[in-house]
Image: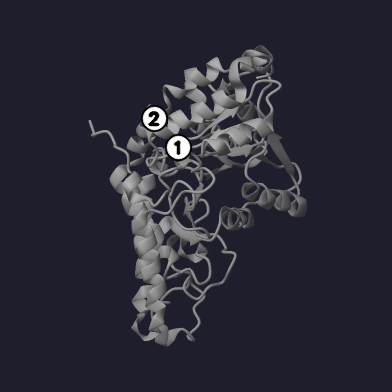
Amino acid sequence: MSRPLTCQRAHFSLPDDFHYLNCAYMGPLPRVAERAGIEGLRAKRFPQAISPEDFFDPADELRERFARLIGAPEPNQVATVPSVSYAVSTITRNTETGRGANVVIVHEQFPGNVYPWRRLVAEKGGELRVVGPPGDGRRGEGWTDRILDRIDRDTVAVSMGTVHWTDGTRFDVEAVRARTREVGAAFVLDGTQTVGAVPIDVAALKPDALVVAAYKWLLGPYSLSLAWFGERYLDGIPLEETWHGRRDSENFAGLVEYEDEYQPGAVRFDVGQRSNFALIPALSASLNLLLEWRPERVAAYTAALMRDVFPRLRDLGVWVEDEPWRSPHLFGLGLPAGTELDRLKASLEHHRVGVSFRGTSVRVSPNVYNTQEDAEALVRAFEAALGSDARRGADTLMMKR
């Protein structure tokens, strides 16, 4: 059995007097990643020292580290892209649809995984099926059932998050994958809110694509994302016809000997000017930390950190999803009926607690830099805002859920 992870706050430059429970909004950049990024910026002080290898080797190292993190045997199936929407747009460009076909997505999923599918069915035909949660209180368990019910022989793709980004509701992605395989539909996963914080194994799950924005749980810089492509999409057409996506592009002297053949694997899908000398090294440094910490230990750390918080919040009338359908690192807190939202926000600010408000939930997302004091500060802020009257309306909330 692996040794439990201890608090890793020393790797970060977070203020000592602030309780940052908001990694789902943006992960703080570790000190080692900050240093790597600055060093990359400084390299351009003297461009003559930047060699042709510097355009390729760091990106390939990044692919290798991300592949290890997600259990992918082939690093060349990883592409460096600027955003989830860029990768999903690449996928929709290579997905066939038409009259009578349908694409299944989840209600209120992140826009970057919605707009490309809306454009696809608007231009090529087909139905976009948006599946919402049940209204019977079985949000996590029942939501997966509803998704499965909407997949049929005319489904060409199912595109969803590994969890719901607003409140961490867990989906049974294995069951959804099995169903898409039955009907021959593509299965596209947005892992932005899980990869790095909980384990995922693409070799076992075998999705057709997994897309991850780097600036959250990968603890990387903004404007850089990573996408793993399965066999279904590897021979697809990229959004951009880049020079580095072509065979033999490592030979700078021969770049004007234009080549129609792409580089093998997912390199063809890399964004133009992908060899960012600051962002690539920064993300690589963060991935090194994640590989050292290991996602299963990160998940265990955050679960243990918040375990005693949930019963205390429930005593205040706050709704918390049952554990089987609640992410260990990302969860939504449903407020009792009649809660004064401004009062709660003021209390959180007073107690120096950073969280997010998403939809109808207060979204809380701890990570390895958080301490027991951070968890206590969250409870104190809710106690101060809800007080002894919080039980009023709790029964109403539970009935609604």
Residue at disc 1, secondary structure: loop
Residue at disc 2, secondary structure: helix
Q: Would you say the residues marked 2 and 1 are in contact, meaning their CB atoms lie under 8 Å apart?
A: yes
Give the residue type that dot 1 points to.
Pro
Q: Quadrant of residue 220?
A: bottom left
The residue tagged 2 is: 305
Q: Picture coordinates of residue 31 (x, y %)?
A: 36, 56
320 to 275, vertically: above or below = above
49 to 386, vertically: above or below = below
Q: Picture coordinates of residue 253 (x, y %)?
A: 41, 87
Instruction: For residue 43, say whether it is visible.
Output: yes
Q: Looking at the image, which residue is at 36% across and 38% down?
A: 298
Quarter of the figure that contains the C terminus: top right
Q: Picture coordinates of residue 14 (x, y %)?
A: 42, 49
Give the residue type that dot 2 points to.
Leu
Q: Quadrant of residue 123?
A: bottom right
The residue tagged 1 is: 366
Q: Looking at the image, which residue is at 53% across and 66% down?
A: 271
